[in-house]
Amino acid sequence: MKFINLHNNYVNPINGQTIENTFITDGFLKDDPDNKKLEVSFRLQATVKIKELDFSGETPKEIEIEKIKTIAETVLVFDSFERPTMATINNNQVDLFKYLAEGNELDGSEEIVVGYPTYTSAQQYFLKDNLGDKLVINPNLPALYQQLVTLFLLQGADKNGKPIGFYGENIGVQFKFDK
C-alpha cells in the first residue's frame, strides 16, 4: 500500500511542528487465528540526516548519512468488534451491506460512513503473502469493497472511535492513497 503526501511535509496537528521528507509505510501484519485477532500497523516515517564518525580512514572524520526514523505508529486491531458501514439513503441512515444484500443499488450521491470490520472480514481485505511484501488491498474484492477499504484507511475510525492516523488526525488529512 502506498500513501502519498499531499504536501511536501507533515505538520503535527498537536504542536504545529513541520517534519520534512515524511512518508507512511506498512508496519506489521499479525494474524492470530487461534484468538481471531488481526493487527495491522502503519508507520509515519521521515528520512533524516544524522552525523556519525567514520573510522575507515587513518583518522576518524564526521560524515553525514541518511536514515529512516519512525515518528509515529498506529495499530489497527480487528477481532469480534464490529461497527456497520452506514449510508444515507433518502435522508435515512441504513446499514450499507444490508441495503445492498436486499438488491438495492447506490447511485453515487450517498454519504457513506465507513464502519469497523471484524477479524473475519478484515482478513479478506488485506494481503501480505511473504515477509517483506507490501501490504495490499485484496485485488479480488469487488470495486465497491476496495473503495470502502481505501475510505476506511483514509477517513475511518478505530475500534475506540479515534481517527485512524497519527496524533489524533486521519491519515487522509495529509496523505492520499496511491494504488
Image (cartoon, rainbow, N blue to C red):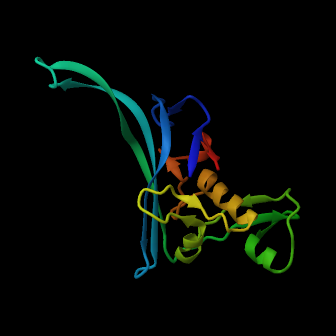
In-image side of 8 versus 149 (left or right): left
Image spot of residue 12 (x, y percent): 48, 35
Picture residue at 56% right of the left edge, 65% below the top: 126
Image spot of residue 1 (x, y percent): 56, 52
The residue most toward the front is 57
Q: Quadrant of residue 143?
A: bottom right
Picture residue at 62% right of the left edge, 35% below the top: 6
In the displayed structure, 59 sits above or below 76; it is above
The residue most toward the left is 58
In-image side of 70 versus 56 (left or right): right
Picture residue at 43% right of the left edge, 35% below the top: 46
In the displayed structure, 118 sits above or below 57; it is below
In-image side of 75 versus 122 (left or right): left
Image spot of residue 81 (x, y percent): 53, 74
Image spot of residue 113 (x, y percent): 70, 60
In the displayed structure, 115 sits above or below 48; it is below
In the displayed structure, 123 sits above or below 59; it is below
Picture residue at 56% right of the left edge, 74% below the top: 118
Q: Nearer the viewer, residue 178 or 84?
A: 178
